[in-house]
Amino acid sequence: MITVDDILREKRHTRVVTLRMQETVADAVRVMKRENISSVIVTDICGTEGSTVMGVFSERDVTRALLEHGSNTPRMLLASLLKREVISCRLDDGIATVLRLMDEHQVRHLPVMEEYTLIGVISATDLMRHYLREAEMKTLLDPALGGMDAHLTPLR
């Protein structure tokens, strides 16, 4: 079974980008553009636990906020636009679980949490890339599909 941990290992050189709840939509858009990402994790400082994940703010949230709040959107605080429930997954969750969560909650990014600690982020794009790589490897190795085995001749 492919797990969230497997997917995160494939994207090993990416980092999680976070913003504080007190930052604005304009701040989030600037960071997403600069980092070439489609979401940021929004955190808050909790006295006993340190930094706590409060939600995910994505390009889709920017669009929704623009439709609902118009020209005030860039100045709005991220805290005012976050959904109250944080949907997350764990490292040992299987891909089917992640896809089910994304579908059920209509989200494309999930924080990966272990014991209240943010480990990473998994996105629908990460899952698509994984399956594309898997399909390419099958094609590469399957002689029936013209893969490299089809061109090998046995040694005599």
Image (cartoon, helix red, strand yellow):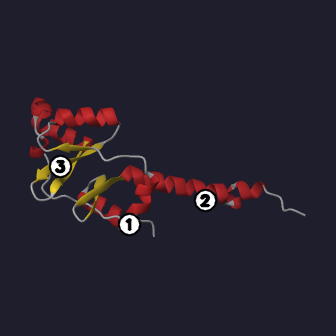
Specify the farthest residue to the bottom.
1
Q: Identify which amino acid the numbered label 1 is placed on.
A: Ala
Q: Which of disc 1 and disc 2 is earlier in sequence?
A: 1
Residue at image position (11%, 41%) is 22
How far apart, in angstroms, are the residues tagged by discs 1 and 3? 27 Å
Q: Which residue is mark 1?
A: 96
**Few, some or many C-alpha atoms within 10 Å of disc 1 (few <14, some 14-19, many ≥20)?**
few
**Few, some or many C-alpha atoms within 10 Å of disc 3 (few <14, some 14-19, many ≥20)?**
many
How far apart, in angstroms, are the residues tagged by discs 2 and 1? 20 Å
Residue nearest the observer in this picture, 73 or 103: 73
Q: Position of residue 14 (x, y in %)?
A: 39, 46
Q: Secondary structure at mark 2?
A: helix
Horizontal side of residue 53 vs 133, given as left or right: left
Q: Which of disc 2 and disc 3 is earlier in sequence?
A: 3
Disc ID at residue 43: 3
Q: Indicate the quadrant where residue 66 lies.
A: top left
Residue at image position (34%, 62%) is 98
**Few, some or many C-alpha atoms within 10 Å of disc 2 (few <14, some 14-19, many ≥20)?**
few
Q: Which residue is mark 2?
A: 138
**Residue 135 visible, this angle:** yes
Horizontal side of residue 69 vs 103, given as left or right: left
Q: Identify which amino acid the numbered label 3 is placed on.
A: Thr
Q: Secondary structure at mark 1?
A: helix
**Residue 111 visible, this angle:** no
Q: Identify which amino acid the numbered label 2 is placed on.
A: Lys
How far apart, in angstroms, are the residues tagged by discs 3 and 2? 40 Å
Above-or-below relation of 38 to 47: above
Badge 2 vs badge 1, beta-carbon distance below 8 Å: no
Q: Quadrant of the C terminus?
A: bottom right
